[in-house]
Amino acid sequence: MEVHEWKLRGLHWHCYAQITDGRSYGNDRARRDRTTDLPPLVVREWLAKPDRLIRQSPRTPEDAVAWLQREFGRHASQMTRSQDGHVEGIPDETRWGAALHNLECGNDVPLAFWVNGGTSIVSLAVVAVADCGVRH
């Protein structure tokens, strides 16, 4: 049985989802403010945001990918598709396989994509957190 980095490091994840209008998303100063609901400029900075923004706290990479898939699926009809039908031009096997691999390696997984004809952006992030004995 393969032991993954995430197990060795004792990780779980915090999941974040935010829909932001393009103007607010482009306001870097506001995005640096830890008290706003805006997606941060750096994915790890989600952890400094208010806890109320945590949507889920998966205990395994598979559960984290399942959350990403559900959230992504909620908005897929508003995204562009390539000629071969792939959302945002990336086959699902590639997108979710890469996400699972990164999580198993202890990495964060951010996704962002424009919706509503490019007027809003959906930001999804799964951020690795060391277990500290606190259950969320």
Image (tube, rainbow, N blue to C red):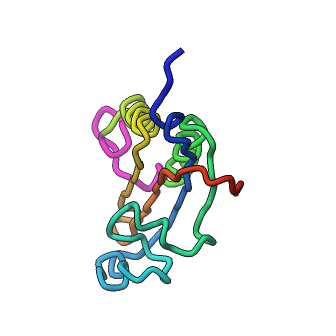
107 vs 81, nearest the viewer:
107
Is residue 79 within the magenta segment? yes
Q: Position of residue 5 (x, y in %)?
A: 45, 34
Name the quadrant containing residue 43.
bottom left
Q: What residue is rendered at 62% in x and 60% in y?
A: 55
Residue, far right: 135
Q: Nearer the viewer, residue 70 or 39?
A: 39
Number of dots carrying numbers = 0
Q: How far across and how far down the image is residue 97, in percent?
A: 42, 30
77 relative to 63 in the view: left or right: left
Q: Quadrant of the C terminus?
A: bottom right
The overriding secondary structure of the stretch rendered in magenta is: loop
Q: Residue at x 36, y 31 (%)?
A: 94
Task: Please provide the residue range marked out in magenta.
Answer: 76-89
Q: Nearer the viewer, residue 36 or 94?
A: 36
Residue 28 % position (x, y): 29, 80
Task: Judge whether residue 107 is colored magenta.
Answer: no
Quadrant location of the N terminus in the rendered image? top right
Question: Residue 8 versus residue 25: which sits nearer the camera?
Answer: 8
Q: Identify the residue at horizontal 54%, vertical 37% (top origin).
A: 61
Q: Position of residue 15 (x, y in %)?
A: 55, 56
Where 52 sits versus 83, above or below?
A: below
Q: Which residue sits at x=38%, y=71%?
A: 40
Report the side of 70 relative to 47 (left or right). right
